Amino acid sequence: MKIQVVEYVPKTIQGEGPFAGQIVQLVRFSKCNLECIWCDTREKMNSPTVEIDTRDLIKRGLPIVVTGGEPTIAPEFEDLLAILCSSEHPTYVETNGLRFYSSWLRKFPDVTWIISPKLRSSNNDPYPEQRLQELLSVLGSPHIFLKFVISDPDRDFQDPMFRRFVGDIINGHLFLQPADNDIDIYRKMIVEGPEYGRYTLQLHKIGGLL
């Protein structure tokens, strides 16, 4: 299967979340269904697309990170996951969760989901209640990780969505990172945030990758 993406990196590091530091392949789809004020991939999403063959991804052997933009809105998304799962290839999907469906855990059992719900400080509308319930229903799965980008600790740690999610997530499955790798925000997060989160920076930015 051939797919159109705006970026393919055959060897890089996973820069954030539960697999930070791991050598991976990166597949980036264009377009997004949100507009975050601190988005760090907006320019890449408007880049010309390139064609890649899923057979080449599998042959390479490295875990595959599927990201965006928002990959779940890409027409090829489910077909791509089906192919990767049929080969039992390690696959990590980064999504904002607005179009995540709990049935995908059964449909794509080899996929790990890094869901990054966007808080109100991102300048997006609150998530619809139906979407929140869908996400809340899967927080006990070992295949689900939550990642929150924090731009205003005073506001974000009191955000109703943040408070609903963090109480149900499995220990070790909550990741918190500052917007733009801002060290001042990072320090404040550590002082004011929950004790059971993992506080991380984006390694690929520190290393000058991507």
Image (cartoon, grey):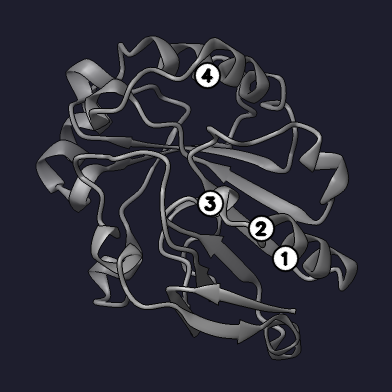
Mark earlier in primary sequence (4, 3): 3
Q: Amino acid at mark 3?
A: Glu
Query: What distance separates the C-alpha of mark 1 from that of mark 4?
Result: 29 Å
Task: Give me the disc on residue 94.
Answer: 3
Q: Are dots 2 and 4 in contact, CB under 8 Å? A: no
Earlier along the polypeptide chain: callout 2 or callout 4?
2
Looking at numbered disc 4 in the image, what kind of residue is underneath it? Phe
Label placed on residue 77: 2
Judge left or right: residue 198 versus residue 205.
Answer: right
Residue 91 position (above or below residue 146): below
Q: Mark 4 packing: few (<14 Cα in 10 Å), some, or many (20+)? A: some
Mark 1, residue position: 80
Question: Residue at image x 50%, y 20%?
Answer: 166
Dot 1: what SS?
Answer: helix
The residue most toward the left is 184
Where disc 2 sits, the SS reads helix
- C-alpha separation, residue under disc 2 versus residue under disc 3: 12 Å
Q: Amino acid at mark 1?
A: Leu
Disc 2 to disc 1, C-alpha distance: 5 Å
Of badges 2 and 3, the one in the foreground is: 2
How many circles with numbers are drawn on the protein? 4
At label 2, which amino acid type do we have? Phe
Task: Give the residue number, with chain letter if any, for mark 4.
Answer: 165
Gap in angstroms between the C-alphas marked 4 and 3: 17 Å
Q: CA distance from mark 2 to mark 4?
A: 26 Å
Horizontal and vertical percent position of residue 29: 49, 64
| Front of the two marks 2 and 4 | 2
Comparing labels 1 and 4, the label whose residue is closer to the camera: 1
